[in-house]
Amino acid sequence: MAIINTFAKCLDSPYLLKDKDAPARIPELLPRAGERLDGAERIHQAGHDDSADVVYLAYEAMFCCLRALVYAKGYRELGLRCLMLACENLYVRTGLLDVALLHQFERAQRLKLTPPEAVEAAAAFVKRARELLG
């Protein structure tokens, strides 16, 4: 299979598909994002944090938001790259989401954020996803 590097290629691949039932999954994702963010904040504020734990929980919060945003548009992903490309196409290019949030998500995935950066990025992502999804 060719390298998938565009939204259109994702739609032609087995990794992103239209799913009319996808929006029904949002109610479970946003609370989970909030729980993960809360966990990251609590560990970080306790001052005994293992930076990987904080960053990983923040990443999970952002991942839930990313999924919820794409599901809201009636798509389901079967691959992270297509999830990100769908979000970029549906939200970043339309001016609804700051690309910096996607960049922070990528950095969190690679554990390249400090705990304060991760908590801040996840909080911003969760806040914006909630605003967009009502």
Image (cartoon, helix red, strand yellow):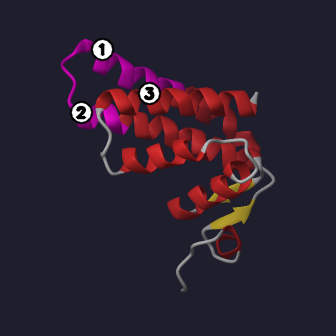
Real-space CA distance between mark 2 and mark 3, rounded to the nearest whole angstrom: 14 Å
Determine which quarter of the picture holds residue 4.
bottom right
- Residue 86 visible to an observer of this rendering: yes
Circle 2 or circle 3, nearest the eye: 3
Q: Secondary structure at mark 3?
A: helix
Quadrant (top left, top right, bottom left, bottom right) of the C terminus:
top right
Q: Is residue 77 left or right of residue 54?
A: right
Judge whether 102 appears above or below 127 on screen.
Answer: below
Real-space CA distance between mark 1 and mark 2, rounded to the nearest whole angstrom: 12 Å
Main secondary structure along the magenta-highlighted residues: helix
Residue 52 lies in the magenta stretch: yes
Residue 132 lies in the magenta stretch: no
In the image, which disc is placed on residue 45? 1
Which residue shows up at 76% across the image and 57% down it? 19
Which residue does the numbered mark 2 point to in the structure image? 51
N-terminal of the two: label 1 or label 2? 1
Which residue shows up at 67% across the image and 28% down it? 130
Q: Nearer the viewer, residue 10 or 18?
A: 10
Q: Nearer the viewer, residue 23 or 124?
A: 124
